[in-house]
Image (cartoon, rainbow, N blue to C red):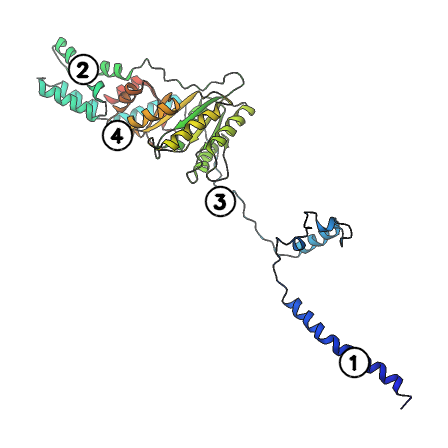
Amino acid sequence: MNDILPIILPILAALVVLAALIPVLMKTRRNIKDYPETRDANDPAESGQAPGGTLLEDRPGAAGPAAERSTLEAADVDDTDTVEVPDDVAGLEIVPVETPMPVAGRLARLRERLVKSNTVFGKGLLALLSADKIDENVWDEVEETLLLADLGTEPTMQLVDALRERVKVLGTRTPEQVKALLREELLKLVDPAMDRSLNVTRQGDKPAVVMVVGVNGVGKTTTVGKLARVLVAEDKDVLLGAADTFRAAAAEQLATWGQRVGVPTVKSDIDGADPASVAYEAVKAGIDQEVDVVMIDTAGRLQNKTGLMDELSKVKRVIEKLAAVDEVLLVLDATTGQNGLNQARVFSEVVNITGIVLTKLDGTAKGGIVVAIQKSLGVPVKLVGLGEGADDLAPFDAESFVDALLN
């Protein structure tokens, strides 16, 4: 028995120690099984970063050099399945660069459309003034026709008085004579002597800067895109600034217009970004890249919203810290008629309008709004749009416009 004790005692001691260790091992096993699958990125220990911001592997005594860890992680990546990472530009249409139509060709097309769409002046007035007898009733109808054509009260009275006098002196009234009279008087009202050229010439080391403004829904962004095509057709180097930061996809829409003619666009990726900042960066880029023209698209705003109009004024002031604003073009929808005059007056007071872009002129059989706006503001209509096509914007020509009105 005494001989066996030295053998049994170590075995019993080992069993006692093992029995004491079993609960500890079981607890440790449970902890491993229940360990969270995702780590807390905010916990410095879990993120591999010390509380003070120092990477743990860079601290003295840290386990494992960073290079060795990178090698191991790279090996792990090789064993994983390939995952497609979404691209910020995925799904965007790749638009081929187009060659815009020459400006001269556009004028002919626009005149054809105007001839088809405008009948008030041509058919209505010519029929009235070619009547065998022109009495007060006829003149009343002439006046009413002109007012319905959005000519405005003052221009209407001016035109009627001039026609009365000339018809009285002329005596006979063949259709050819009446048409010639009407053309001469309308041309005076439209005023071919007004300077309708766009100020888009570089001055020294600064590009020409064009701001495009207007109320919501008149087609400002589209107008900027179409005007870019006009300028590219005239061999101008153009850059666009997407300062409409509030309308969803406005910047992308403008960039697509630019892409179609190879024109870059400066825009912010942040919705609701400060439009003045975007405009500033666009002009700065235009100066750095030595472009000819920088065009700034602005957000639509109601003319009776003081805060929004003040913001528009701020955009112009910020731009002028870098370069002069050579053109401020107000885009008006021709179908809004006399309401467009109210818009024009307010915008002119805030940002000093230099020219009018009249869109959707093919959607109205009137056309007199051209005269009314110019008479009211003393600002020329410089561009007209007669359709939704990419090249349906052209410089306004007074004689072509009047000839089209009279068919």
- Residue bearing mark 2: 176
Tell me if mark 2 has few (under 14), some (14-19) or many (20+) residues whose alpha carbon lies within 10 angstroms of its own.
few
Q: Residues within 10 Å of mark 1 (few under 14, many from 20)?
A: few
Answer with the quarter of the image where residue 21 lies. bottom right
Q: Earlier in the sequence, mark 2 or mark 3?
A: 3
Residue 403: % across, % down? 26, 19
Spatial separation of the CA atoms under disc 3 and disc 4: 38 Å
- Residue 100, visible in the rendered structure: no
Numbered mark located on residue 168 in the image = none
Vertical placement of residue 276 versus 70, above or below = above
Given contact means CB atoms under 8 Å apart, are the residues at marks 1 and 4 in contact?
Answer: no
Q: Nearer the viewer, mark 1 or mark 4?
A: 1
Task: Give the CA separation, mark 2 to mark 3.
Answer: 59 Å
Does residue 44 appear left or right of residue 360 in this picture?
right
Quadrant occupied by the C terminus: top left
Indicate which disc residue 364 carries.
Answer: 4
Which residue is nearer to you in this view: 113 or 358?
358
x, y percentage for residue 92? 48, 42
Labels 3 and 1 touching (C-beta < 8 A) = no
Q: Tell me the amino acid under the disc marked 2.
A: Glu
Looking at the rendering, in which quadrant would you find the N terminus? bottom right
Q: Which residue is mark 3?
A: 91
The residue at the point 17 percent across, 17 percent down is: 160
